[in-house]
Image: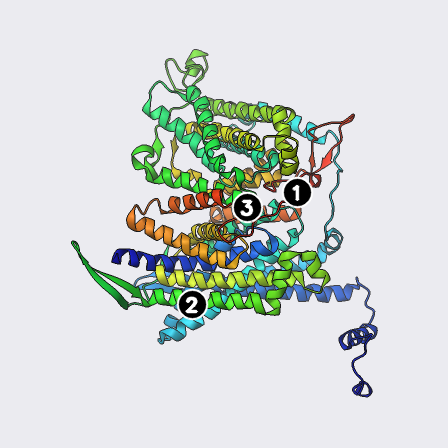
């Protein structure tokens, strides 16, 4: 029982990170109907920026007050990663707007290769370890088994991740639901041409969608860095595929769906590794995806696609 | 304005519109292509681009984190950062000054209609075919020192052409977006490798059809669950299947050898003649002098024949009811169903035919390498094959050939950029930049020609006379 709860907590933490990345996928998909394959790599870029800012602050300027450092890291990496997201959209996707569906998919894959190799060339291919910065936690409950006592630990890191994700989710839902920007996004999602006729700046709205997605990916990147303590240029691919899986699982285009999908994928992975084998956790996640889609072809919370004749 | 304050804002002209109108009237009537103005704009534009490059590059070019004793350390490279900004400034300025006119004209949704020189594709195809037939001898004769390298490259390109043609059936003809095509390539490679290493009597020629059948079977297994999915859902599930196959190959150690892969895969023989030195070998039998190049030439012709067979079968299938059904499915699934086409069977045959060719190419890959491991079957491989198909122009057979030559030949050329070391110093390793340039090329070609390099298609049904159709008239991989 304690083991299960512990795994659930771990799964929620991982799922939060996937969920944050998945929101980027789902927003972009909702608004322009394309898979932004480079999004996973934007996440990777975000985590590299977070690493660099963290090192500059701690080792060059000698900041010691951790919460302030983390806050600055968060803000700076969000800003710089947003610039990356904006540039990717401007260079690779905007020229192809209105073109056929597969063209931006190919440029997205191309952009993903470019980002990975750019980071590899400029930062080196080796894994970069960062010692754990936030340690400690609270013990929720303790139980004893034949093998000894098992304590359910909720570390501060996990609390921060889940808390920040929750806050961002609430913030984003409000942003989409209440602000003029959110309204513009929803209108572009429904009908870009009509939105443009009614005075919505479609290009700007789409750019801002990419910027928002990249900012969330940067948060996820920083969390990933702090949680696992390692980054390399290749982390974006698997995280991206998982997050995209999460977005599809939840119903692509739906914001709560992305979060739900992320949490589910995180839970499936950790539970599978906890009870079965670590090696096949990806297989488990992908199989669940296939099974869900076979029975619910538009995901858990997605709107069923209307076939127009 | 003060006199208006007492009145309500004009009913017919809301205040904002009024101001805008006044501004418009007051604004100097600038001619659009005033050179001085456009230079100023270009410089401003380039400055913004350089600033952006500076922002983007700051944490990657200017700052580098390295593993040092006791943790990570930060090193700075300001010169590199500033040079990159200057390069971006210059590049952007050059683009806006020299390509400005062209860009302004080309902007907007230009509809590329059917302007294809009739017969050009056919002639190009014939010339390429003729060259491909004599290719090994051409290289042996004209490049005696480097023939092995060139023929090896030709084999690689030919493998990708075959894979591209195979995937073209699924994506280009049937319009099903498949991001996991490499799974079938892997199935083909592993079925041959495992059969050959476990059973002595199975050689390449027995295993080849078996690998094709197994891959087609897997195509059907994987195709079955995704029948109801459309578009991007289909894409992600096929991607997931590709990853599942790779993960299983990686972790099922007892069966596949895991990350160690399978080695000692037998080489193909010519009716039992092995390409070895000495008694009973190919050279000995025909009374030739032994040369290791003979085996490469033989391998080249195997993949050449396989690829040509793929092409011929595809072209033939296109004219048959099943091929017509694929293309009809791509254009409109609902119309297909209304006309009584069994969409389930149509999709499954497309999947399994494509998979079969992937499997055949896979077993060729295994025999060429003599060693396979899951490393060779990553998503990148699927992405490259899909990129070849899309860059060439979906549904265009000759386009696949051109895109393979450009992309795969290009990657390999980038391996040989040693002369750049003379410019950038001996620390400069050009091979590092290979994939970076590859990715950039993918983006640039696609932005330049979104419909692929070949922009006309052969009509599959002809009424009275044959007309070329523009690529934009064809639904392409929309994934119905």
For this view, does B444 lie left or right of residue A123?
Answer: right
Callout 3: helix, strand or loop?
A: helix
Location of residue B63 with respect to B193 vertically, above or below: below
Mark found first going from the N terminus, 1 or 3: 3
Chain name for mark 1? B
Q: Which mark is residue B232?
A: 3
Chain name for mark 3? B
Q: Quadrant of residue A150?
A: bottom left
Instruction: Where is residue B376? Give x, y as percent.
Output: 43, 38
Is mark 2 in CB contact (under 8 Å) with mark 1?
no
Q: CA distance from mark 1 to mark 3?
A: 19 Å
Q: Quadrant of residue B454?
A: top right
**In the rendered image, which quarter contains the N terminus of chain B?**
bottom right
For this view, does B365 lie left or right of residue B118?
Answer: left
Q: Residues within 10 Å of mark 3 (few under 14, many from 20)?
A: many
Instruction: Where is residue B367? Give x, y as percent.
Output: 42, 27
Q: Nearer the viewer, residue B360 or B105?
A: B360
Task: Name the front one of labels 2 and 1.
Answer: 2
Q: Which residue is mark 2?
A: A164
Residue at 43% over, 16% down:
B282
Chain name for mark 2? A
Instruction: Where is residue B141? Give x, y as percent.
Output: 55, 24
For this view, does A235 lie left or right of residue B160?
Answer: left
Q: CA distance from mark 2 to mark 3?
A: 30 Å
Residue A195 visible in the shown view:
yes
Q: Which residue is mark 1?
A: B451
Residue B84 visible in the shown view:
no
Location of residue B93 with respect to B409 vertically, above or below: below
Location of residue A160 with respect to B214 vertically, above or below: below
């Amino acid at each position: 029982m304690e083991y299960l709860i512990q795994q659930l907590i771990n799964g929620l933490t991982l799922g939060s990170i996937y969920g944050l990345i998945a929101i980027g996928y789902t927003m972009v998909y909702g608004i322009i109907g394309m898979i932004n394959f480079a999004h996973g790599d934007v996440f990777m870029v975000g985590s590299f920026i977070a690493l660099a800012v963290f090192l500059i602050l701690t080792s060059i300027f000698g900041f010691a007050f951790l919460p302030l450092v983390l806050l600055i890291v968060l803000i700076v990496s969000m800003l710089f990663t947003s610039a990356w997201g904006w540039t990717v959209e401007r260079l690779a996707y905007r020229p192809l707007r209105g073109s056929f569906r597969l063209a931006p998919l190919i440029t997205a894959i191309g952009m993903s290769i470019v980002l990975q190799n750019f980071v590899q060339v400029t930062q080196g291919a080796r894994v970069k370890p960062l010692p754990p910065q936030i340690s400690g936690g609270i013990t929720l409950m303790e139980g004893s088994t034949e093998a000894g006592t098992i304590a359910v630990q909720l570390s501060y890191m996990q609390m921060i991740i889940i808390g920040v994700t929750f806050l961002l989710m609430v913030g984003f839902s409000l942003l989409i639901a209440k602000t003029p920007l959110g309204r513009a996004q929803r209108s572009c999602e429904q009908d870009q041409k009509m939105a443009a006729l009614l005075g919505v700046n479609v290009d700007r709205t789409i750019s801002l969608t990419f910027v928002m997605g990249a900012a969330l990916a940067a948060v996820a990147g920083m969390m990933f860095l702090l949680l696992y303590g390692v980054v390399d240029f290749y982390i974006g691919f698997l995280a991206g595929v998982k997050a995209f899986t999460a977005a599809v699982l939840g119903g692509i285009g739906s914001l709560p769906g992305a979060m739900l999908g992320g949490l589910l994928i995180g839970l499936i992975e950790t539970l599978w590794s906890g009870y079965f084998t670590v090696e096949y956790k990806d297989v488990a996640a992908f199989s669940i995806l296939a099974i869900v889609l076979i029975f619910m072809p538009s995901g858990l919370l997605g709107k069923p696609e209307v076939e127009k004749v | 304005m003060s006199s208006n304050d007492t009145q309500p804002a004009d009913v017919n002209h809301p205040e904002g519109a009024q101001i805008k109108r006044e501004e418009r009237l007051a604004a100097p009537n600038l001619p659009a292509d005033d050179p001085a103005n456009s230079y100023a704009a270009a410089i401003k534009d380039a400055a913004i681009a350089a600033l952006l490059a500076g922002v983007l590059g700051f944490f990657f070019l200017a700052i580098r984190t390295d593993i040092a004793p006791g943790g990570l350390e930060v090193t700075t490279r300001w010169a590199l950062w500033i040079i990159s900004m200057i390069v971006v400034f210059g590049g952007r300025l050059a683009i806006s000054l020299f390509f400005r006119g062209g860009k302004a004209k080309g902007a907007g949704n230009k509809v590329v209609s059917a302007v294809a020189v009739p017969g050009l594709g056919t002639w190009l195809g014939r010339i390429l075919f003729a060259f491909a037939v004599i290719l090994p001898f051409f290289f042996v004769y004209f490049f005696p020192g480097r023939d092995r390298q060139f023929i090896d490259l030709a084999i690689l390109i030919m493998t990708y052409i075959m894979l591209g043609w195979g995937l073209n059936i699924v994506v280009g003809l049937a319009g099903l977006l498949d991001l996991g095509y490499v799974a079938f390539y892997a199935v083909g490679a592993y079925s041959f490798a495992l059969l050959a290493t476990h059973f002595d009597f199975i050689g390449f020629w027995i295993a080849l059809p078996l690998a094709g059948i197994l891959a087609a079977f897997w195509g059907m297994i994987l195709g079955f669950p995704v029948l109801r999915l459309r578009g991007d859902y289909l894409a992600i599930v096929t991607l997931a299947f590709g990853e599942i196959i790779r993960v299983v190959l990686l972790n099922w150690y007892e069966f596949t050898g895991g990350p160690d892969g399978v080695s000692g895969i037998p080489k193909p023989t010519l009716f039992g003649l092995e390409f070895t030195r000495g008694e009973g070998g190919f050279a000995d039998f025909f009374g030739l002098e032994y040369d290791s190049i003979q085996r490469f030439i033989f391998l080249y012709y195997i993949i050449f024949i396989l690829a040509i067979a793929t092409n011929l079968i595809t072209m033939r299938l296109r004219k048959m009811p099943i091929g017509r059904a694929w293309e009809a499915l791509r254009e409109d699934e609902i119309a297909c169903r209304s006309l009584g086409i069994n969409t389930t069977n149509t999709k499954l045959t497309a999947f399994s035919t494509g998979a079969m060719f992937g499997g055949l190419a896979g077993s060729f890959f295994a025999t060429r390498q003599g060693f396979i491991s899951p490393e060779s079957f990553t998503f990148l491989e699927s992405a490259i094959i899909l990129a070849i198909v899309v860059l060439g122009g979906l549904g265009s057979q000759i386009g696949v050939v051109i895109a393979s030559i450009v992309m795969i030949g290009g990657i390999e050329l980038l391996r040989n950029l040693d002369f750049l070391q003379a410019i950038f110093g001996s620390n400069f390793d050009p091979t590092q930049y290979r994939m970076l340039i590859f990715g950039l090329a993918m983006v640039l070609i696609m932005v330049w020609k979104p419909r692929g390099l070949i922009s006309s298609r052969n009509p599959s049904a002809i009424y009275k006379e044959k007309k070329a159709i523009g690529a934009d008239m064809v639904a392409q991989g929309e994934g119905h």
